[in-house]
Amino acid sequence: PDTCFTGTLACQHGDDECAGNAAETCVKHLKPDFKDYMSFAYCYEASFPPSASEVSACASAIGLTTDDIDGCVNDADLMSSLQQTEGYATAQAAIPGTPTVILNGESMSSTRLMLRQVCKSFATLNPSADTPAGCSSSDAKQLRGSAASSSVL
């Protein structure tokens, strides 16, 4: 219901998580290209909670400044709207808990074999592409050989 997305935002892991979620939500708003906002999130969370200089470096790497992010985070109306949008998207995705990994639109039932599933999906979708780091050449060859007979995860 709509009332689920009003009032004071509470984060399971406290104020640092709330601040990080707000920063990442604003970066997604300011730089909607997946590669940009995910690069920021990866950088930001690499040393969580990051120092001010680390946040600045993460922002700079995608063409933003901390002033850009702070301007968004400190705009109460914009922040409320962005957080509601993210809340609705999470609710619609029916996220069962954490961690939740969605691969090609499907929620993975287990993350135990995540790398193998990602490599298999990559090989299926990109049969002529170079094998990504992390997917061993023997696994990739085996996966490419079975890709024609398997469905995308």
Image: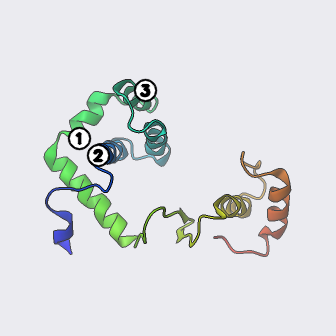
* Figure colour scheme: rainbow
Identify residue type, mark 2.
Answer: Ala
Q: How far apart are the alpha carbons under marks 3 and 1?
A: 18 Å
Q: Which mark is residue 57?
A: 3
Where residue 6 sits in the image (x, y, percent)? Answer: 15, 62
Q: Residue furthest front?
A: 13
Residue depicted at x 46% and y 29%:
61
Q: How far apart are the alpha carbons under marks 2 and 1?
A: 6 Å
Where residue 113 sits in the image (x, y, percent)? Answer: 67, 64
- Label 1 belongs to which residue? 73
In the shown orientation, is residue 55 left or right of residue 1?
A: right
The correct choice, above or below, for 82 with respect to 43 in the image is below
Residue depicted at x 56% and y 69%:
108
- Label 2 belongs to which residue? 22
**Which residue is nearer to you in this view: 108 or 105?**
108
Q: Are marks 2 and 1 in contact (CB under 8 Å)?
A: yes
The correct choice, above or below, for 105 with respect to 119 in the image is below
Q: Secondary structure at mark 1?
A: helix
The disc, 2 or 1, on the residue closer to the chain's N-terminal end is 2
Q: Quadrant of the N terminus?
A: bottom left
Q: Quadrant of the C terminus?
A: bottom right
Residue depicted at x 33% and y 70%:
91
Q: Are marks 3 and 2 in contact (CB under 8 Å)?
A: no
Where residue 69 sits in the image (x, y, percent)? Answer: 29, 35
